[in-house]
Image (spheres, rainbow, N blue to C red):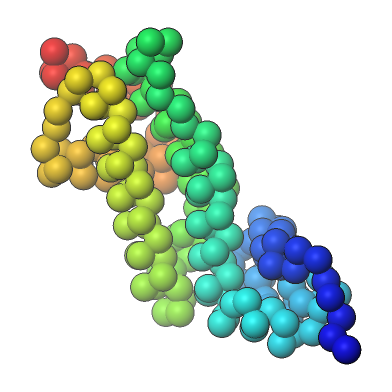
Amino acid sequence: MPKIIPNIRSRILQSARRQLAEGGYPSLSLRGVAKDCGIALGTTYHYFQNKQDLAIEVLREDWNNEVIAEIQIDPSTMAPENVSVKFYSLLGKFCSKYNHVLLYHRSSDDMLEAVRVEQRAIVNDTVSFYRLYLSQYQIQETDAMLDALAETSVHFAFIHTEESVFRQFAKIYLQSKQ
Protein backbone atom coordinates (compact mmCIF):
# COMPACT_ATOMS: atom_id res chain seq x y z
CA MET A 1 0.00 0.00 0.00
CA PRO A 2 1.43 3.41 -0.95
CA LYS A 3 2.41 5.81 1.79
CA ILE A 4 0.02 8.76 2.02
CA ILE A 5 1.80 12.02 2.69
CA PRO A 6 -0.43 15.00 3.41
CA ASN A 7 0.15 18.23 1.49
CA ILE A 8 2.99 16.73 -0.53
CA ARG A 9 2.76 19.24 -3.38
CA SER A 10 2.98 22.19 -0.99
CA ARG A 11 5.87 20.51 0.86
CA ILE A 12 7.70 20.05 -2.45
CA LEU A 13 7.17 23.73 -3.25
CA GLN A 14 8.36 24.80 0.22
CA SER A 15 11.52 22.74 -0.15
CA ALA A 16 12.15 24.15 -3.63
CA ARG A 17 11.57 27.67 -2.31
CA ARG A 18 14.22 27.10 0.38
CA GLN A 19 16.70 25.72 -2.16
CA LEU A 20 16.13 28.68 -4.48
CA ALA A 21 16.59 31.12 -1.60
CA GLU A 22 19.79 29.46 -0.40
CA GLY A 23 21.60 28.82 -3.67
CA GLY A 24 19.55 30.06 -6.58
CA TYR A 25 18.43 28.05 -9.57
CA PRO A 26 21.69 26.08 -9.97
CA SER A 27 21.26 24.61 -6.47
CA LEU A 28 17.70 23.44 -7.06
CA SER A 29 17.34 19.72 -7.75
CA LEU A 30 14.38 17.38 -7.74
CA ARG A 31 16.57 14.81 -6.01
CA GLY A 32 17.38 17.30 -3.23
CA VAL A 33 13.71 18.24 -2.88
CA ALA A 34 12.72 14.57 -2.67
CA LYS A 35 15.35 13.93 -0.01
CA ASP A 36 14.31 17.02 1.95
CA CYS A 37 10.64 15.94 1.84
CA GLY A 38 11.41 12.29 2.65
CA ILE A 39 9.78 11.04 -0.55
CA ALA A 40 10.85 9.05 -3.55
CA LEU A 41 12.30 10.96 -6.50
CA GLY A 42 9.48 9.63 -8.67
CA THR A 43 6.95 11.38 -6.46
CA THR A 44 8.45 14.75 -7.34
CA TYR A 45 8.18 13.84 -11.03
CA HIS A 46 4.50 13.05 -10.47
CA TYR A 47 3.97 16.73 -9.66
CA PHE A 48 6.68 18.44 -11.75
CA GLN A 49 8.30 17.32 -15.03
CA ASN A 50 11.67 18.90 -14.23
CA LYS A 51 13.40 21.50 -12.08
CA GLN A 52 12.45 24.26 -14.51
CA ASP A 53 8.73 23.52 -14.01
CA LEU A 54 9.25 23.40 -10.26
CA ALA A 55 11.12 26.73 -10.15
CA ILE A 56 8.50 28.42 -12.31
CA GLU A 57 5.68 27.10 -10.12
CA VAL A 58 7.41 28.52 -7.02
CA LEU A 59 7.61 31.90 -8.77
CA ARG A 60 3.96 31.75 -9.86
CA GLU A 61 2.74 30.79 -6.41
CA ASP A 62 4.74 33.53 -4.70
CA TRP A 63 3.72 36.11 -7.30
CA ASN A 64 0.06 35.30 -6.70
CA ASN A 65 0.40 35.18 -2.90
CA GLU A 66 2.83 38.04 -2.32
CA VAL A 67 1.81 40.56 -4.97
CA ILE A 68 -1.59 39.88 -6.57
CA ALA A 69 -3.37 38.84 -3.35
CA GLU A 70 -1.89 41.73 -1.38
CA ILE A 71 -2.83 44.67 -3.55
CA GLN A 72 -6.11 46.28 -2.61
CA ILE A 73 -7.49 49.35 -4.34
CA ASP A 74 -9.82 51.58 -2.41
CA PRO A 75 -10.09 54.99 -4.08
CA SER A 76 -11.90 56.40 -1.06
CA THR A 77 -8.90 55.84 1.22
CA MET A 78 -5.80 56.00 -1.01
CA ALA A 79 -4.49 58.59 -3.40
CA PRO A 80 -3.67 57.16 -6.85
CA GLU A 81 0.05 57.80 -6.37
CA ASN A 82 0.04 55.79 -3.12
CA VAL A 83 -1.70 52.80 -4.71
CA SER A 84 0.88 52.80 -7.46
CA VAL A 85 3.77 52.99 -4.97
CA LYS A 86 2.25 50.21 -2.83
CA PHE A 87 2.08 47.96 -5.89
CA TYR A 88 5.62 48.92 -6.84
CA SER A 89 6.81 48.07 -3.33
CA LEU A 90 5.27 44.58 -3.57
CA LEU A 91 6.69 44.17 -7.08
CA GLY A 92 10.12 45.25 -5.86
CA LYS A 93 10.12 42.76 -2.99
CA PHE A 94 9.18 39.96 -5.36
CA CYS A 95 11.84 40.95 -7.89
CA SER A 96 14.50 41.17 -5.17
CA LYS A 97 13.55 37.76 -3.86
CA TYR A 98 13.67 36.06 -7.27
CA ASN A 99 16.06 38.23 -9.27
CA HIS A 100 18.61 35.40 -9.29
CA VAL A 101 16.06 33.00 -10.80
CA LEU A 102 14.63 35.44 -13.30
CA LEU A 103 18.08 36.53 -14.44
CA TYR A 104 19.62 33.03 -14.45
CA HIS A 105 18.04 32.31 -17.82
CA ARG A 106 20.89 34.19 -19.48
CA SER A 107 23.19 31.25 -18.82
CA SER A 108 20.76 28.34 -18.95
CA ASP A 109 18.97 27.26 -22.11
CA ASP A 110 16.46 25.17 -20.17
CA MET A 111 15.20 28.26 -18.33
CA LEU A 112 15.29 30.74 -21.20
CA GLU A 113 11.82 30.29 -22.65
CA ALA A 114 10.13 29.56 -19.32
CA VAL A 115 11.48 32.77 -17.79
CA ARG A 116 10.48 34.82 -20.82
CA VAL A 117 6.95 33.47 -20.45
CA GLU A 118 6.91 34.23 -16.71
CA GLN A 119 8.31 37.73 -17.17
CA ARG A 120 5.60 38.39 -19.75
CA ALA A 121 3.00 37.03 -17.34
CA ILE A 122 4.27 39.43 -14.65
CA VAL A 123 4.02 42.32 -17.11
CA ASN A 124 0.51 41.20 -18.16
CA ASP A 125 -0.60 41.03 -14.53
CA THR A 126 0.90 44.48 -14.02
CA VAL A 127 -1.06 45.76 -17.04
CA SER A 128 -4.23 44.28 -15.51
CA PHE A 129 -3.43 45.97 -12.21
CA TYR A 130 -2.89 49.34 -13.90
CA ARG A 131 -6.08 48.98 -15.95
CA LEU A 132 -8.14 48.29 -12.80
CA TYR A 133 -6.29 50.83 -10.68
CA LEU A 134 -6.63 53.66 -13.20
CA SER A 135 -10.29 52.88 -13.90
CA GLN A 136 -10.99 53.18 -10.15
CA TYR A 137 -9.85 56.79 -10.48
CA GLN A 138 -11.72 57.34 -13.79
CA ILE A 139 -8.50 57.47 -15.80
CA GLN A 140 -8.73 55.80 -19.19
CA GLU A 141 -5.56 54.66 -20.90
CA THR A 142 -4.65 52.95 -24.16
CA ASP A 143 -3.38 49.37 -24.13
CA ALA A 144 -0.03 50.53 -25.50
CA MET A 145 0.43 53.02 -22.67
CA LEU A 146 -0.64 50.45 -20.06
CA ASP A 147 1.93 48.04 -21.48
CA ALA A 148 4.60 50.76 -21.37
CA LEU A 149 3.72 51.64 -17.76
CA ALA A 150 3.86 47.96 -16.79
CA GLU A 151 7.15 47.32 -18.60
CA THR A 152 8.68 50.40 -16.95
CA SER A 153 7.45 49.39 -13.49
CA VAL A 154 8.78 45.85 -13.84
CA HIS A 155 12.09 47.12 -15.22
CA PHE A 156 12.44 49.62 -12.36
CA ALA A 157 11.74 46.84 -9.85
CA PHE A 158 14.28 44.46 -11.38
CA ILE A 159 17.04 47.03 -11.25
CA HIS A 160 16.07 47.99 -7.70
CA THR A 161 15.11 51.58 -8.45
CA GLU A 162 14.38 53.48 -5.24
CA GLU A 163 10.73 53.82 -4.29
CA SER A 164 11.14 57.62 -4.20
CA VAL A 165 12.18 57.60 -7.87
CA PHE A 166 9.18 55.46 -8.77
CA ARG A 167 6.91 57.73 -6.72
CA GLN A 168 8.15 60.68 -8.81
CA PHE A 169 7.54 58.70 -12.01
CA ALA A 170 3.98 57.89 -10.86
CA LYS A 171 3.34 61.49 -9.83
CA ILE A 172 4.47 62.88 -13.20
CA TYR A 173 2.34 60.33 -15.07
CA LEU A 174 -0.75 61.01 -12.96
CA GLN A 175 -0.32 64.80 -13.30
CA SER A 176 -0.22 64.37 -17.07
CA LYS A 177 -3.64 62.69 -16.91
CA GLN A 178 -5.37 65.53 -15.07
Tell me how many marks there are: 0
- Quadrant, the N terminus: bottom right
Across and down, in percent, residue 172 comes to: 21, 19
Across and down, in percent, residue 43 comes to: 72, 82
Q: Quadrant of residue 17?
A: bottom right
116 relative position to 96: left or right: left
Across and down, in percent, residue 162 comes to: 43, 28
**Residue at image x 36%, y 26%?**
84
- Vertical placement of residue 88 versus 64, above or below: above
**Residue at image x 84%, y 75%?**
4
163 relative position to 150: left or right: right
Residue lying furthest front: 1
**Residue at image x 25%, y 35%?**
131
- Vertical placement of residue 131 versus 19, above or below: above
**Residue at image x 54%, y 64%?**
57
Q: Quadrant of residue 87?
A: top left
Q: Quadrant of residue 73?
A: top left
